[in-house]
Image: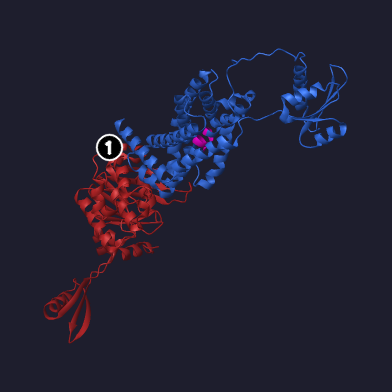
Chain colours: A red, B blue
Amino acid sequence: MIRAEGLYYSYTGNESYAVAGISFQVAEGEIFGFLGPNGAGKSTTQKILTGLLPVQKGEVEVGGQDIRSASRELFNRVGVAFEHPNIYRKLTGLENLTFFARLYDVPTADPMALLRRVGLGEVAHRRAGAYSRGMQQRLVFIRSLLNRPKIWFVDEPTAGLDPATSQLVKEIIREERDRGTTIFLTTHNMQIADELCDRVAFINAGKIVALDTPREFKLKHGQKLVAVEYRSEGRLKREVLSPLVEEDRLKLKRLLTEEEVETVHSQEATLEQVFIKLTGRGLQG
Amino acid sequence: MRDMTRRFLTLTVKDLKLLVRNHHLTIVVAVAILYALLVRFLIPGELSFEPNLVVWDQTAHGIVGRLYAEHARDSVVLVGSEKDYLAALETGNRIGLKVTGQELPAAIEVTFQGFESPRIRRVLEASLRAQVAAMLGQPTGFPTTSLRSADVKQPPFNLAMVPVLVLFEAVFLGMLLAAVLLYSEKEEQTLRAYRVSPGGIPEYLLARSVAMGLLGLVSAVVLTLLTVGAGINWPVVLAVVFLGSLVITLVTMVVANMFHGISQFFVAELILMVVLSLPLVSYFQPGLSLAPLRLLPTYPLVFALREAYFPTGSPAVMTTAVLQLLVTLGLAFPLAVLSFRRQLVVRDV
């Protein structure tokens, strides 16, 4: 559904590349996470994929079309949820959505229903400039769903949102995946990537340093250990056991049956830990 | 085509809403009213180029002095001595006329201030000679005829300014407001959202031009009704103002898109305004109708407006203007689309 091959991009027109030889493919119906810190090249890549920046070097296909000669038909199938709340501030929330809905040649979702879906129904007729940042973010998010996209680019979908709204946004992303939408999710939030993505590409300094499923990343780079916290003789105790060692397996069985176990945690790595291990830098940088 | 038309109408309605909510419509109407007040109450209906004369008639009958006093009472000072003559000349920018001799034809001597150019001196000298000769019933020089029919009246000076003010308000103010709208979209980054929709550059530019054209029409109608009145050639006025606004908006959009903000664009706008104002030289000095000036879209606009407001029996001026603006639009639109598309890809991301 999305294919990038040997993609390079330089803002300065010289050898200083913001994107330096990126290649990947996203299959239909997949949620593909593009994970990296600020300035790693995530947004530049997404801008090239959506036609906002020209392809300087390499090849990009989106929905079977070369993005350099993308037709209107392609943009009828594509949705882009920007991180920045780029809305017409002098238009109401409903007018913003109605305006964009009328640009499409395909059946579109009911703007009012979308506004209600993210809790903006009551302020639909208020000018968007008067919305809080979080409300504007929600407006931009649902605007990208107006044309019921088959390919959906989502940039930092939960940035600046409260936990409840973040949860709602994640729910909507899952619903879209269930509908068969191909989702390209750009984020530096490893929890989002872990929860939602089928595969994740780590991008650093314009290059993809690793690409795999979150599960494989964690298994490959984590420790195969289980930490058990249990109460014994009135005191809280902690054991770290390996399921690969016979003695530890028996101990784990005994603790689970005989002791008052309070927590059991597998010790696989988080995506952030894997990222740091692979790149030597954190995701927040 | 139907989809493009729908998108064009959607964009036009959106732009009109933004023009109203950004108070652009209010500004345009307020400026039109202000201009109308200037025309009605501040700019004079006639500009007198007659010099203020000091006449010292030493002839026995004093006939020249008497005749001047009868015909041009307000601009003539009659004196009876050389001392008064010189004193009167020292007061204000006056020209002296000393008439000597006992019998007609009298000898006449003209006294200038000294800073007049030779050309002005010759014109004034000839004018005075003709005036005096006419007063004395003497031949005034060459017989003259005029190409224009005698019943064509020149408009009062204040009303003759209306086409110029329409140009300034409907076109030049429109330029500024079109740029403001573009920069507000750049600041809000809404163009990015538009560019990942099926909406294209042609309908975007056309809608913006039409919205600005409609704003220009409002301004022209308000200014015209409050100054010249309703009895004018409305189809031509509306057509040239609308087409002129379309062309100028396209030019503005392309130029404004080369800059990141209104402050950077300001210098370019000033240059653009100066260039587009050059046809006003021909408007006020018809002898300076240079060929390159005729190529500017403001040239046919201002002359067609004058003909539509104050007909001189030259309808071809209006037809030619409409055709010239249509041709300019036909050339400007594809160029604007190409230029805007190329620049927008890199500049607005």
Closest to the observer: B125 or B336?
B125
- Residue B225 drawn at (x, y percent): 48, 32
Q: Is residue B264 magenta?
A: no
Asked whether the viewer can see residue A53, the reply is no
Residue B310 vs A178, above or below: the answer is: above
- Residue A233 drawn at (x, y percent): 17, 87
Q: Residue type at mark 1? A: Asp
Q: Main secondary structure of the magenta part?
A: helix
Identify the magenta region.
Answer: B166-172
Residue B33 vs A271, above or below: the answer is: above
Quadrant in the picture for residue B206? top left
> In which quadrant will I find the C terminus of chain A?
bottom left
- Residue B267 drawn at (x, y percent): 57, 43
> In which quadrant will I find the N terminus of chain A?
top left
A117 sits to left or right of B65: left
Closest to the observer: B274 or B339?
B274
Q: Residue at x 58, y 17 (%)?
A: B151
- Residue A123 drawn at (x, y percent): 29, 53
Q: To which chain does the residue with label 1 belong?
A: A
Asked whether the viewer can see residue B204, the reply is yes
Residue A164 vs B3, above or below: the answer is: below
Tag 1 residue: A105
Q: Is residue B168 magenta?
A: yes
Q: Secondary structure at mark 1?
A: loop
Q: Residues within 10 Å of mark 1 (few under 14, many from 20)?
A: many
Callout count: 1
A184 sits to left or right of B135: left
Closest to the observer: A243 or B281?
B281
Quadrant in the picture for residue B8? top left
